[in-house]
Amino acid sequence: MPEGQDSRKAFTRFSLLRAGLFLFLAGCLLGGLPACAEGEHEECSFFDTSLHKTGEGMRYWYEEEGGFMEITGIPYKELGCKHCHVKSCDQCHAEEAGDQTMRFSVDKSRKSDTCLVCHVRATAAMGFDKQAGFTDVHFGAGMACADCHKGKDVHGDGKFRHSMRAVDSVNVGCEDCHPREDLSDEDYHTVHDGKLHCNACHVTGSMTCNNCHFDEFLRTGVKKGKSIPSKSWVLLVNYQGQVTSGNAQTLTGKGKTFVAYAPYYTHSVTKQGRTCDACHGSEHVKTIVDGKSVKITDFVDGTLVPAEGIIPLVPGQIEWAWLDMGENKPWTKMQNPPKPQVQIVGYGKPLTEEQIDILAEPME
């Protein structure tokens, strides 16, 4: 072989080696791309570490210290809940081609109906809104989920996260489309000096699954009918330096009671925010300031009666109705239920005494 060809081949091998070393070091410095899970094909993508694929948000808080697994004693991987995540791209992108074959579709992934198949709490919230004659301002304008939640929110970015509430996990924000300088009623948006998130004023009641009866869920393997939905109140929760809207999930199992509180955005948004007196000096705030508990749910004549309005998150001063059920038996109120185990998830925090004091001041 001519000497020039040997030199060129040697240079090419060196260049490839240098490029490979550079990519390896860059991968180390940047945290690298996700490795394929054991047993998977060799080719995998950054989608494999996305929350849509892993379902990690549910597992993490369930198994975290203080989570509901301390009551059940059953690891997440042994529950039917683990099936609530996307197996492959097909779930959102595959559609019938009309000749007994399938094809890849971007249009299908942009339809809200595709999202709502799995995001059933949002579906239930829309059902409550329809009954009340209310339409979310964004859906009412003809928008779909994909108009706000774009690539990274859906597909991830190769970084493994425990929760959608982790920093930089969900990237859409109200001010992406509604810059503060464009808002006409400027006083409402400056008086809180950035300490109040848009959600706290512009979302209606949060969709809540009350009293999930875990024993019956384990017995039947079916969630439907094992909890009671409601949508009439919003918790005020601290999250990332702001007061925002929150929610709760209550469960019973093995004769014990459990409640998890979390920051929560419900897709029931009003153009006009709440008035000042909806929060400041409100009935629920007065109840908490007086050292009493807000009865967030009650059980009257076989019916769950939820509270309404804004409720500050002070876990020790929120009272729940705890219910029991059995095979082919109606809901009944638990007699002398134990004090609930409380967990605050999604990196949320209760309101501080200072914040409660501010809320206690009525607005004229």
Image: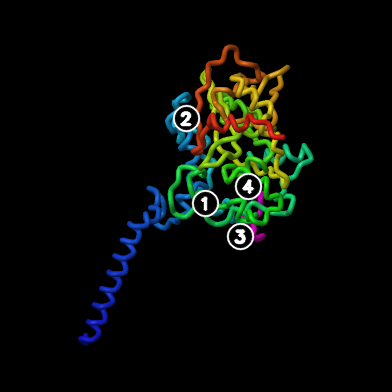
Work out how far the residue at label 1 is from the one at label 2, CA to CA, in angstroms: 29 Å
Work out how far the residue at label 2 is from the one at label 3, CA to CA, in angstroms: 38 Å
Q: Which residue is mark 4?
A: 190
Q: Which residue is mark 1?
A: 88
Mark nearest the camera among 1 and 3 is: 3
Mark nearest the camera among 4 and 2 is: 4
In depth, the one of 304 and 188 nearer the eye is 188
Element under disc 4: helix
Label 4 Cα neighbours within 10 Å, binned few <14 / some 14-19 / many ≥20:
few
Work out how far the residue at label 3 is from the one at label 4, CA to CA, in angstroms: 40 Å
Verify CB contact (< 8 Å) between mark 4 and mark 2.
no
Residue type pointed to by label 2: Gly
Q: Is residue 251 above or below residue 301?
A: below
State which tag comes first along the sequence, 1 or 4: 1
Element under disc 1: loop
Label 3 Cα neighbours within 10 Å, binned few <14 / some 14-19 / many ≥20:
few
Q: Quadrant of residue 302?
A: top right
Residue type pointed to by label 1: Ser
As drawn, is 298 to the left or to the right of 80? Answer: right
Residue type pointed to by label 4: Thr
Q: Position of residue 91 (x, y in %)?
A: 57, 51
Q: Is residue 322 visible?
A: no
Element under disc 3: helix
State which tag comes first along the sequence, 1 or 3: 1
Q: Which residue is mark 2?
A: 67
